[in-house]
Amino acid sequence: MPDRSFLNWPFFEDRHRKLAERLDAWCAKNLPVDHRDVDAACRDLVSMLGRNGWLKPTALDPANPGPLDVRTLCITRETLARHDGLADFAFAMQGLGTGAISLFGTPDQQRWLEKTRAGEAISAFALSEPRSGSDVANMEMTAARDGNDYVLSGEKTWISNGGIADLYVVFARTGEAPGAKGISAFIVPAGTKDLGIAERLEVIAPHPLARLCFDNARVPASALIGKPGDGFRIAMSVLDVFRSTVGAAALGFARRALDESIKRVAERKLFGAPMAELQMVQGHIADMALDVDAAALLVYRAAWTKDTGAARVTREAAMAKLFATDKAQEVIDEAVQLHGGDGVRKGHIIESLYREIRALRIYEGASDVQKVVIARQVIGTA
């Protein structure tokens, strides 16, 4: 039985505890899904999650708008990740892809949210470029005003849900000022003329990813989110909300690795006794449990801080994301060691976790970038 004692921490309300219990039961019945056709699996997961109401927290309700509940997002990601990494991906991208619309969209733009929250449309967040991943202010893609339209030219890459999304939130340089102050955000439906899928990208933990090409793709001025030049601020605000949820997903992977390892050492005999009786093994389990609890404290501190009214949680979210993803990598590596050959056998849950965790230390701000963010926050308030 997975450890659920953390739900008694003061970060949570009863509604969060009930959500965790209901979702865990649902996951046990419905996950994992068949991953052999990743595109089809993601479409099915979005539809299934939406149909059963689990996507509602990913965006505000246009009929009853209110702030996003980051603790709910984190609990959901942690639970889904513990059961099926692709289910976590499907959930997370619905939130990240529509975050700008939730936080800054007009009522007309927020009509998209009715579809994404119901699992009837898949969303994507198109920020990274071939030469500007971590350095967002250096993006090269342009959006030129032409009468009542904007004309988008350039490329985006490593775009999650690329190739299967129904809408993309795209960031492009509109030139109001140099660097970060000259970027704007746009809603671009997948069927937009001259938007193409230049390349599908394959990675070690299969997810739908693509490089997008905008060859003078035209969108109406009403597709602009916020004001011209607000794009960098919008992107950072979205990441400020969702960055701690990446730590929550890593936490889910780490908890699963710890659970599987506890089972393994209890059942497997070595030198005539269960592995669990060996002090070296006990040391590994202790390290793993310590890292899991420490990560959980940082993740849910960040989520609680945002939910209780903090305008920004840049420092807290960066700490949560950095620590949880790095420590999850270590926990899963320990699990591989405890499982021996089975830990690297294709198709084994531990081998799957080993592949799933690596990307989390890169996307939505690589670990080294998080250190810079934390240092700047600490030095700036010293």
Image (cartoon, grey):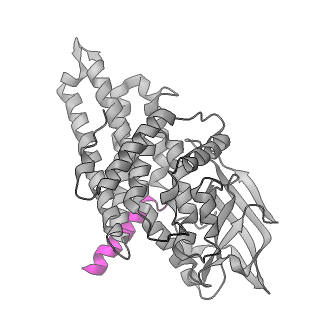
Left or right: residue 227 compared with residue 281: right
Q: Residue furthest top?
A: 272
The image shows residue 340, relative to residue 72, as above or below, that is: above
Q: Which quarter of the rendering shows the N terminus?
A: top left
Residue 369 inside the magenta-drawn segment: yes
Residue ID at (52%, 66%): 61
The image shows residue 19, relative to residue 29, as above or below, that is: below
The image shows residue 226, relative to residue 370, as above or below, that is: below
Left or right: residue 212 compared with residue 326: right
State the residue in front, 9 or 363.
9
State the residue in front, 72 or 232.
72
Quadrant in the rendering for residue 212: bottom right
Residue ID at (31%, 26%): 263
Instruction: Provide residue 139's location: percent of width, then percent of height.
Output: 61, 73
State the residue in front, 186 or 151.
186
Residue 299 inside the magenta-drawn segment: no
Residue ID at (60%, 76%): 107
Instruction: Provide residue 88's location: percent of width, then percent of height.
Output: 49, 47
For the record, the magenta segment spans 363-382
Instruction: Provide residue 177's location: percent of width, then percent of height.
Output: 60, 88
The image shows residue 296, relative to residue 276, as above or below, that is: below
State the residue in front, 66 or 42.
66
**Would residue 139 be seen by someone viewing this image from the given angle?**
yes
